[in-house]
Image (spheres, helix red, strand yellow):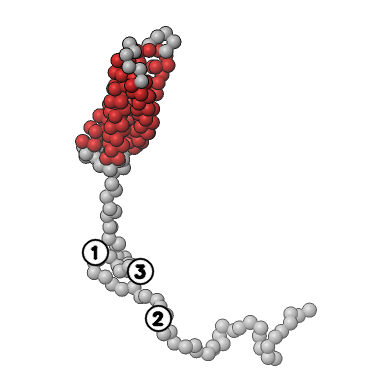
Amino acid sequence: MTAPHWGPPGSSPWADPATPTEPGLPYLGPPPTAQPYAAYPPGQPAPYGHPAPYGQAVPWVPLPERRPQRPGQVITAAVLAFAQAGVVLIASLYLWFFASVADVAVAQADGVHWSATVNALATEGSVLAFVQVLSAVVLVAAGVWALNTRRRSAWQLLVAAHALQVVLAGYWVVRLLSEIGGFDTEGAIVSVALFFAAGPLVGLGMLLLGAGRRWFGGTAQA
């Protein structure tokens, strides 16, 4: 059985390499959209979108210098300053409220033997509430400044703001123990003081040790 044959009679189904073919159109060059390689002066980069000619080295372009990254210790100390400011503001409002109530009680209890003591405590509470509000403002300002500069003065202000909170917590421990201290209340007083001092103590550790200290004053992070 023979394979089917298509084409005129006497022709082969396979083309004969020796058979001449009809000439096609002459080569007109690359399409109009193609960009031929061009020669550029040595050391000069090729224009944007044009590949460098074969054999020509592409010049090395240095990358922009990377700015040093702010250490996590500095960010943590600033965030702790913001959190401490919020806690101190709430505590100051309560302190001012109780001092105001004590003032009203003293005003309505003229001649009572304990009125002088309550009056002194009310005055002390009002003054401390004002001082604590100022310390909260300093905490916020120091935290914002430390996040936006590397000046040594910003580091000093943030350290001072955290240290002031530790001093205030210590003052409250001594003051409350002297007034209402006892076997049943000492543990609660110390616990409250540690709650107020925990954040500032951690913030001081972040700023006084390691990269948190080296960051300020223009010293690069190691």
Q: Earlier in the sequence, mark 3 or mark 2?
A: 2
Q: Amino acid at mark 2?
A: Pro
Packing grade of label 3 (10 A; few <14, some 14-19, many >=20) is: few
Q: Quadrant of the N terminus?
A: bottom right
Tag 1 residue: 43
In what element is the residue under mark 1?
Answer: loop
Residue at 40 percent across and 76 percent down: it is: 34
Packing grade of label 1 (10 A; few <14, some 14-19, many >=20) is: few
Is residue 155 left or right of 196 when viewed as pictured?
A: left
Q: Amino acid at mark 3?
A: Gly
Q: In the picture, residue 142 is in which quadrant?
A: top left
Tag 3 residue: 49
Residue at 70 percent across and 91 percent down: it is: 9
Q: Give the camera-side residue of 91 and 190.
A: 91
| Residue 204 horizontal/vertical position (percent) | 30, 28
| Residue 27 horizontal/vertical position (percent) | 43, 84
Residue at 49 percent across and 88 percent down: it is: 24
Packing grade of label 2 (10 A; few <14, some 14-19, many >=20) is: few
Q: Give the camera-side residue of 190 and 115.
A: 115
Name the mark on residue 32.
Answer: 2
